[in-house]
Image (cartoon, grey):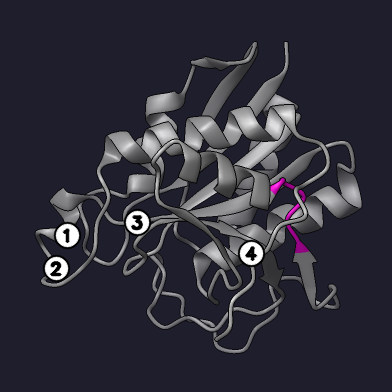
């Protein structure tokens, strides 16, 4: 049976939950188009998170990998286009590490692109009433670190796997703890990620539609 690995990240920066893990956990063990979803939680710790991600891939032998992470301030599900080879941490990780201008992989390429059909995913979600968009930057914190680590592993050790990163917004419950922060219901986010899995399973070549940004 085809396996889809979905990873979420543990809570960080004093929040009690992380929607990325809530979504992954909700989908764990369910099926989409005959493929079974397996969820794994990853730590918000540089280096260790990528080690755990690789272990999860080796343990589950997935066809697709969706790495999820929280992006506070985002108003929609953000399907990331590119991971860059740098960590520049605005805040310490959960182990107190705060690397600045440090490569994710020493001597690795400057960047990797997602191998998920990012524009097809966005189009599917929007048609289903789920706010979504292509994002041109996964930041320089743990999420980009995981995205780059995932794509480096795929490029060097698992070319048969397709994968990428999706940032999810804050839930209303978390937004209530932070004045002015936008949010999206967890049910809508779960629906969106399930649709993203469906689209990736059904789509090999991405759509040729605009997904760029002016700024």
- In primary-sequence order, the first of circles 1 and 3 is 3
Is 25 above or below relative to 8? Answer: above
Residue 47 visible to the viewer: no
The residue labelled by disc 1 is: 175
Q: Secondary structure at mark 3?
A: loop
Q: Are marks 1 and 2 in contact (CB under 8 Å)?
A: yes
Does the magenta segment cover residue 193? no
Q: Residue at x 50, y 48 (%)?
A: 68
Disc 3 and disc 4: Cα gap in Å?
Answer: 19 Å
Q: Nearer the viewer, residue 169 or 43?
A: 169
CA neighbours of label 1 inside 10 A, class few (<14), some (14 to 19), many (20+): some
When asked about the image quadrant of residue 137, the answer is bottom right
Left or right, 90 with reference to 66: left
Give, as a single range, the part of the protein colored magenta. Answer: 113-117
Is 148 above or below relative to 41? Answer: below
Disc 4 and disc 1: Cα gap in Å?
Answer: 27 Å
- The label nearer to you, 3 versus 4, is 4
Numbered tag placed on residue 169 in the rendering: 3
Left or right, 64 with reference to 75: right
The residue labelled by disc 4 is: 211
CA neighbours of label 3 inside 10 A, class few (<14), some (14 to 19), many (20+): many
CA neighbours of label 2 inside 10 A, class few (<14), some (14 to 19), many (20+): few
């Amino acid at each position: 049976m085809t396996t889809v690995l979905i990873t979420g990240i543990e809570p960080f920066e004093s929040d009690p939950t992380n929607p990325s893990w809530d979504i992954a956990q909700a989908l764990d063990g369910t099926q989409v188009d005959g493929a079974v979803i397996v969820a794994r939680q990853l730590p918000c710790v540089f280096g260790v998170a990528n080690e755990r991600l690789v272990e999860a891939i080796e343990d589950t032998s997935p066809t697709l990998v969706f790495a999820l992470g929280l992006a506070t301030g985002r108003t929609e599900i953000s399907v990331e286009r590119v991971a860059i080879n740098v960590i520049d941490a605005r805040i310490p990780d959960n182990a107190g590490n705060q690397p600045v201008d440090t490569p994710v992989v020493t001597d690795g390429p400057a960047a990797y692109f997602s191998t998920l059909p990012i524009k097809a995913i966005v189009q599917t979600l929007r048609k289903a009433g789920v706010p979504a968009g292509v994002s041109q930057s996964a930041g320089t914190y743990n999420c980009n670190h995981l995205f780059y680590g995932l794509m480096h592993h795929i490029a060097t050790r698992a070319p048969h796997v397709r994968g990428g990163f999706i940032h999810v917004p804050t839930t209303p419950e978390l937004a209530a703890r932070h004045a002015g922060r936008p949010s999206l219901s967890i049910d809508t986010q779960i629906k969106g990620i399930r649709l993203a899995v469906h689209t990736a399973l059904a789509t090999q070549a991405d759509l040729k539609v605009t997904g760029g940004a002016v700024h």
